[in-house]
Image: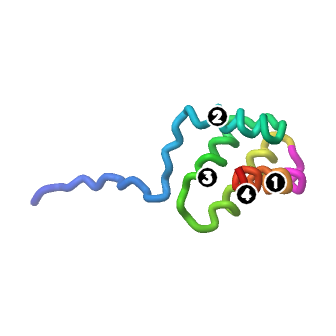
Amino acid sequence: MGKRYRVSQLPSVNRVYVPYVLIPLWQMKLRERYGIEIDEDIVKILITARYTKSTWKWQRTVKKVAEELSKRGFSKAHAYSFAKNLVSAVVLR
């Protein structure tokens, strides 16, 4: 029969580990600079995009943040414009 080999998942190159310490720091940074309160889930999406090395990451981040905001009651147009402004704020630091 032969040996059976177990195929394990290789870690993705684009996967980024986000230390828990960064989430409150970025929340504080966004609160101080722009005066906005951002939820942990959205900040985690923004941090992941900030430290990922890939193409099209900002467009995907805008889409993810807009989806998260629309789940929380924002209209689609307002969520997209707010997400775009938020991502540009993170890009500019």
Where does the magenta region start and end?
74-79
Locate residue 34 relative to residue 90 in the image: left or right.
right
Circle on res. 25: 2
Amino acid type at image mark 2:
Leu
Residue at image point 61% right, 53% down: 49
Q: Secondary structure at mark 3?
A: helix
Residue at image point 72% right, 54% down: 92
- Where does residue 59 sit, x and y in percent of width and height? 70, 63
Q: Name which of mark 4 and mark 2 comes first in the sequence.
A: 2
Q: Secondary structure at mark 4?
A: helix
Alpha-carbon neighbours of circle 3 within 10 Å: few (<14), some, or many (≥20)? some
Q: Secondary structure at mark 2?
A: helix
Residue at image mark 3: 50
Q: Name which of mark 1 and mark 2 comes first in the sequence.
A: 2
- Where does residue 43 sit, x and y in percent of width and height? 67, 41
Q: Name which of mark 2 and mark 3 comes first in the sequence.
A: 2
* Residues at marks 1 and 2, CA–CA distance in whole angstroms: 19 Å
Alpha-carbon neighbours of circle 1 within 10 Å: few (<14), some, or many (≥20)? few
